[in-house]
Image (cartoon, helix red, strand yellow):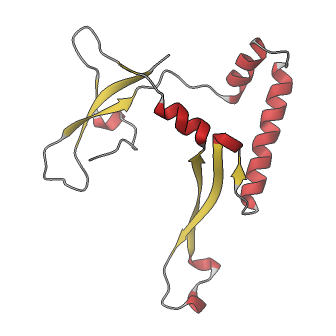
Amino acid sequence: MSVTYAICQRANPTKPLESKKFYPIVQSSGVMNVQDVCASISAHTTFTRGDLIGAVESFLDEIIDLLKQGKIVSLGSLGNFRTTISGIGSATKEEVTKEKIKRSNIVFWPGKMLRDMCNSLVYQSAKKADGAVVVPPEKAPANTPAE
C-alpha cells in the first residue's frame, strides 16, 4: 500500500519575487466517513455496524465535551487533542479579559503510532502515460509547504 502524490507548482509566499517551484502533494484516494469506517470494521469483526457507529459517535461527542472543559484528550499512541485560543495583546495583564479572545482552535498532536506510520510511508507518483500529474495551485491543498 502506498500514498500517491501529484506535483503542484507554487510561489513561495515569503519570497514572492522568486520563481515558482514544484512541490509534491498527496493525491487523495478518497474519503471515508464514520459510517464507511464502521462498515469496514464490521466486515471483518464480530461487531455490528450499528454498534460501532453508536460507540464511535458517543466517543466523538465525549471528546468534544472534554475539549469544551479545557481538557487535553489523549488517545494514547494515536495522539492528543487540545484547545488553543488567540487574542489581542494588551499592555498590562489587568487589561486581558475574555473579550480579548478572538478565536479558538483545536490542535491535534500525533502520537508515536502516527509518527511511526508517517516515517514508514511508501510513496507512488500519480504519473500518467505522458508524465507526472501536475495539479494547478488553486486545486492543491492549502497546507502544501513552501521552502
In the image, residue 25 lies at what x, y percent? 36, 32
In the displayed structure, 15 sits above or below 91; it is: above
Left or right? Give the position of 87 relative to 124: right
Left or right? Give the position of 105 relative to 131: right
Residue in view at x 48 percent, y 80 percent: 89
In the displayed structure, 35 sits above or below 17; it is: above
In the displayed structure, 118 sits above or below 37; it is: below
Residue in view at x 34 percent, y 18 percent: 126
Left or right? Give the position of 44 relative to 99: right
Left or right? Give the position of 27 relative to 73: left
- Rendering quarter of residue 128: top left
- Rendering quarter of residue 65: bottom right
Residue in view at x 17 percent, y 41 percent: 20
In the image, residue 66 lies at what x, y percent? 77, 55
In the image, residue 110 lies at what x, y percent? 58, 44
In the image, residue 112 lies at what x, y percent? 59, 41
